[in-house]
Amino acid sequence: MAAAQSESQKLLILGGTGEAVALAGRLAEDARLAVITSLAGRTREPATAAGALRVGGFGGAAGLAAYLARDSISLLIDATHPFAARMAANAAQACAEAGVPRLKLLRPAWRAVENDNWIDVSDMAAAVEAVSGNGTRAFLSVGRQDLSAFAGLESIWFLVRSIEPLEVPRPLANCAVIQGRGPFSETAELALLEEHRIDLLVSKNSGGEATSAKIAAARRLGLPVVMIARPPAPAGETVETVDEAVAWVAART
Ligand code: NAP
């Protein structure tokens, strides 16, 4: 057993997504691998991943490069959220410096379909501008770190949903805060939009199944959606699914 441990390759998964949890679950049983999932530590009760867990920032790209060397990490999969741009860039830089093979696991973006009424914007600042004139009661689904960008829109009423109670109970002048953790059903999202008389949805283009029901619900109600494009991902090997990421690891173990 001890021999197997010492011979195993260490795989670091940068997590914070459902895909990261699924990937750890698929790989943790492989005796040739020691799987470590890394979380930023934003959520007090994160979904449990198989294998080992470490929590907290590394201290930038240099800190991560030092961690990779010190802990003899053989492979890294960046399975962070498509909007975690800083971590993705740091991972690319650190792996290049440390000579550690890196894979980006990036779920496909949502694409507008018939009857969608999307107002495509390139970033959060453009989303703030797009809200005015397109609605008065907005479901603001951008994550708690970006709420403050909308603080100047005092004539808009916002519905905010958060996994955990917010440190500031009313982060915007006119808002209601509800708690909830995906996946959400289309029926529940429809009921939520109707209950709060929402006339505009603001969303990051996160992609994936867990939070797509709100987009379908907005389509059903004919609501406009301010859809915020993803930041560019760093160049390098990229796959879209957990299966492909498992195959990438298998080819290297
Ligand atoms: P970010 O802006 O790209 O990263 C900011 C800093 O947080 C990083 O420089 C790093 O600190 C630390 N960090 C981020 N992810 C980490 C990880 N997996 N392990 C260790 N440190 C990490 O990231 P973010 O957008 O704040 O997202 C934070 C976490 O929440 C990510 O793990 C992401 O997968 C998850 N998440 C984000 C969103 C979103 O919309 N942004 C949505 C759902 C889940 P150091 O520089 O000190 O290393």
Image (cartoon, rainbow, N blue to C red):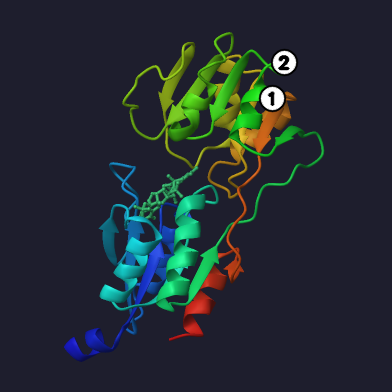
Q: Is residue 124 above or below residue 237?
A: above
**Which of the 4 quarters of the picture holds residue 43?**
top left
Front position in the image: 117 or 25: 117
Q: Give the x, y percent position of residue 131.
A: 66, 21
Front position in the image: 131 or 43: 131
Can residue 71 be seen by looking at this rendering?
Answer: no
Q: Is mark 2 within 8 Å of ligand 1?
A: no
* Marks 2 and 1 in Cβ contact (< 8 Å): yes
Residue at the image point whose x is 72% and y is 29% from the top:
220
Can residue 185 be seen by looking at this rendering?
Answer: yes
Question: Would residue 129 be found to the left or right of residue 160 on screen?
Answer: right
Quadrant holding the N terminus: bottom left
Amino acid carrying mark 1 in the image: Ala
Q: Is residue 122 above or below residue 96?
A: above
* Residue located farthest toward the right when viewing the structure as drawn: 114
Q: Is residue 31 above or below residue 157?
A: below
Residue position for label 1: 130
Residue at the image point whose x is 75% and y is 42% from the top:
112
In 3D space, how far apart are the residues under numbered discs 2 and 1 (Cα atoms)?
Answer: 7 Å
Residue at the image point whose x is 72% and y is 15% from the top:
133
Question: Would residue 154 be found to the left or right of residue 90 on screen?
Answer: right
* Residue located farthest toward the top when viewing the structure as drawn: 155
Residue position for label 2: 133
Amino acid carrying mark 2 in the image: Gly
